[in-house]
Amino acid sequence: MSDEQSESISRYRETSVQAFYNAVDTGKIQTRREQVWDAIKSLGKATALEVHRYLRHTHSFAGDSHSITPRFAELRDLGVIRESDQRECQVTGEWCIVWEIVPSTEHVGLAVYHRCELCGQLTGRSRRKLTPAQKLEKLKKQTATLQAKLTNNEKEKETDQT
């Protein structure tokens, strides 16, 4: 796929992401987006309505859940939260997406979306493309992991044979 078909979902920059983490680290939680992030962090993993309930109790939030729902997509597109799994919501009893925090050490960049080359329709969403240096670093880590697994397997075989 050519670069013309991959577009950034939002105008966020890496400096925005760093500023977000800095605001969190220094305790300057002010925006609704930051409050949603803080709620997820406090709850561990949570559905959108669980976060809404938490905000109503801890931040005297009077708005409805529709005012925080867009914050989940924004935070996901920033790369600071992710969908972890699905389970029954403690508020509604319905099967829902569960969100979790992405630690700053695991942040991989802003999300991008992909369009069909023929019709331009949105076909998928992924993380930003890695630079060649980032790809090389990722391959090195994967290779090291595989080598460690092979070494462990060989040691287990030796142990089993003795």
Image (spheres, rainbow, N blue to C red):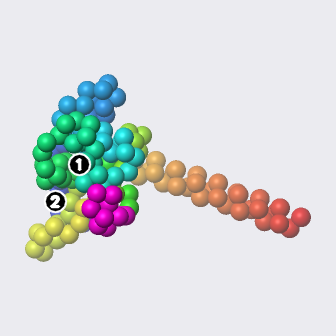
Across and down, in percent, residue 34 comes to: 24, 38
Amino acid found under the numbered disc labelled 1: His
- The reply, left or right, for residue 143 in relation to residue 158 is left
Give the label, 1 or 2, closer to the camera: 1
Q: Say which of 43 and 113 sits in front.
A: 43
Across and down, in percent, residue 97 comes to: 31, 61
User: Is residue 94 covered in magenta?
Assistant: yes
**Can you say whether 53 is above or below 22 in the image?**
below
Pick the quarter of the image with the C terminus.
bottom right
Residue 7 in view here: yes
| Figure label count | 2
Q: Identify the secondary structure beneath mark 1.
A: helix
Seen at 41% across and 52% down, the residue is 135
First in sequence: mark 1 or mark 2?
2
Magenta stretch mostly in which secondary structure? loop
Across and down, in percent, residue 139 comes to: 48, 54
Q: Identify the secondary structure beneath mark 2.
A: helix
The part of the chain drawn in magenta is 86-95
Residue that mark 2 sits on: 4
Seen at 37% across and 64% down, the residue is 87
Q: Determine whether label 1 and label 2 are within 8 Å by CB.
A: no
Tag on residue 37?
none
Amino acid found under the numbered disc labelled 2: Glu
Residue that mark 1 sits on: 52
